[in-house]
Amino acid sequence: MINKKTLKLGLVIFLIGLIGLVFFFDLQQFLTLNYLKSQQQILVDYYHSNTVFTIVIYFVVYVVATALSIPGAAVLTLFGGALFGLLTGTIIISFASTLGATLAFLTSRFLLRDYVQTKFGDHLETINKGIQKEGEYYLFTLRLIPVFPFFLINLAMGLTPIALIKYYLVSQIGMLPGTIVYVFAGTQLAQIDSLQGILSPGLLIAFTLLGLFPLVTKKGVSLINASRQLKKFIKPKHFDYNVAVVGAGSAGLITAYISAAIKAKVVLIEKDKMGGDCLNTGCVPSKALIRTAKMLSYAKRSQDFGIQQATVDFDFKQVMERVQKIIEKIEPHDSVERYEELGVNCLSGEARILDPYRIKVEGRIITTRNIVIASGASPFVPPIPGIDKISYLTSDTLWNIRELPARLVVLGGGPIGCEMAQAFARFGSKVSQVEMAPQILIREDEEVVNLVTERFQKENIDVLTGHRAKEFILEGEEKVLLCEFEGRDVRIPFDEVIVAVGRKANTKGFGLEELGIELTKPGTIEVDPYLRTNYPNIYVCGDAAGPYQFTHTATHQAWYASVNALFRPFKQFRVDYRVIPWCTFTDPEVARVGLNEKDAQQKNIPYETTVFELEESDRAIADSEDHGFLKVLTVPGKDKILGVTIVGGHAGDLIAEFVLAMKQGLGLNKILGTIHIYPTLVEANKSVAGNWRKNHVPEKALRFLEKFHTWRR
């Protein structure tokens, strides 16, 4: 069976041969205006006596010339008008030009698309999404403007994901006005001395304006739809604020900060605590708890550091009080006082969005030109039978406990579940981690999960993957989780359970339902690439918008939400999600940016892997932390980074260099050529780049150098 590579090679040879024949026999001379005018009467007479045959020959020649992008299509169109007349000529040429363009499109797609998308896929992601969503508009506009060479449009569109049938139909319709003009001009061929006779500046300007019409229309329709959405509400003559932000978590704080920094009048509304989940129940308390747990783990590993025995006495209540002190120490950064000093008006109370211009807060109605929703997310509690009969914990409520549970079930194998399972196990809880999927950290590669799972098991965590929670049971004072595993029931007695199976966006109770603001299937608020809802002046950022529920992506989105809201309709920016890093703060840490092998295989993206084991790092050995690895995915044969996974101590810090490299388009050779301090863990970044270089040594050049040095001796 002939493979795709052989077919491509055969097609290239065939096309080169055809084009070569055209130029070798100087066939393009027959497609000049002077030649066709000189033969006009002869060909007209032949057409009248051999009508069908002439149409077929003309049709084939036109299709071939268009498919091969041979200069002369314009002349052929003119001559078609002279030969067939306006109606017949328009019909023949419309179908011939579209068929030829489609063949050129298919050729480009078959020969080049895979290569171009693989090599430049990250840069083309935005274009691809735009084509998938609005490709017909773009193509229709280009087809209407003859300033753009049609053969370039054919080749370029073949590299995009636009559907073949859409391409054909839009091309057929979009080229029709130009075809009619050219064919009509062809009917006056005797009076035309050159192409300039038809391609006059005035006509080109008219075509250009015609081509801009779809885009102008699209923009107009967008404005009309926006106006219609807002028309049913009374617009205030004056606004109290330029922007009102609902929610003072990470996304809301940064939105308010940026808005105030560029001198907009902004109000920030929060019903609970400033700082949101990250400060009060998420990132800050969890990392404080993990830090203390790690100190305990060092004591247990004392012999690894040459200490024969180390004992540590701790009070779990004091540990949890330390967590609260850490929160209190950071609180001033997110306080009302600080934000009031920055120029933000902070209101405490429940917000209710009455309409796109008005928000009610504790009985007071404020008016605003724009609204930014940063309402965050809450732990998702699955409807497992019996869960309402027990006092379960979540990432929101576990910070209230002061007594260490002897037996703890952690429901969920994601980042939060893994972090808390290990932390509590290090404090002394007997931890059972229940995960329905076949592995914890389901998004990570197998060897990453194996390394973390192995560490968990060494720390006496019972990792129960493939276990589906069926029911919570109360048997007197005893609490039991009943799970299904491989068709049989498994009973897990426990004292406390932490539910950590994910988070759901906060979208209820503050007016979204009444306004009809649309939600996605996962339950986040539906937004466009500019973070707008179906109301043009209501924006969303952070966990409520998705698709990533990280503090750093919330603050990233906040810049776009604030700037887009304040400068609409003059300037708006699409959110850039190309390089999103994250880290799971287990021990070892797991940090990611870009693709891992699982992602690349699912998306059918070719890649090479380069690995550096941390057991070879001098600093990791000195720290007795020589476990884990760096794995870099690159474009085959190139140093361009597709993604990086780091497993080991301080992985969340080490990943930063690769995040910068991917964002700025730097390859592994640039990292290899950068001086790194010795001895540090970050040297591992340079080492993995060195491994890539070793794997891509030019053998021929080395053999030549060996002979050169032998000659010099």
Image (cartoon, rainbow, N blue to C red):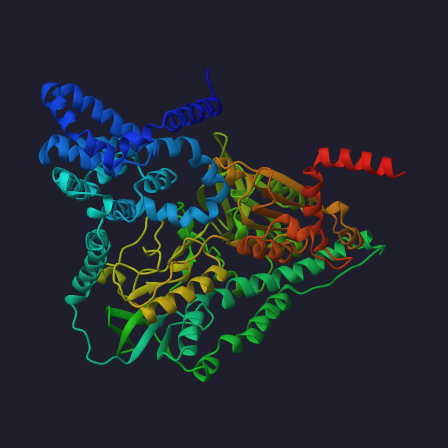
Q: Give the total of numbered labels.
A: 0
- Residue at point 20%, 32% (across, down): 38
Look at 39% across and 45% down and name the residue there.
385
Q: Position of residue 713 (x, y in %)?
A: 90, 38
Q: Residue furthest right?
A: 713
In which image quadrant can residue 92 be found? top left
Horizontally, is 307 left or right of 40 in the view?
right
Residue 501: horizontal and vertical position, in percent? 46, 49
Q: Residue furthest bottom?
A: 341
x, y percentage for residue 588?
Answer: 66, 50
The one nearer the camera, 586 or 183, is 183
Residue 77 image-quadrant placement:
top left
Q: Is residue 538 left or right of residue 588?
A: left
From this viewpoint, which residue is outermost toward the front? 38
Question: Whole-percent x and y of residue 660?
Answer: 57, 57
Q: Nearer the viewer, residue 240 or 88?
A: 88
Using the rendered image of the protein, determine whether residue 644 is visible from the camera's viewpoint: yes
On screen, 45 above or below 541?
A: above
**232 or 480: nearer the eye?**
232
- Residue 166 seen: no
Residue 15 position by quadrant: top left
The residue drawn where x is 58% and y is 75% is: 329
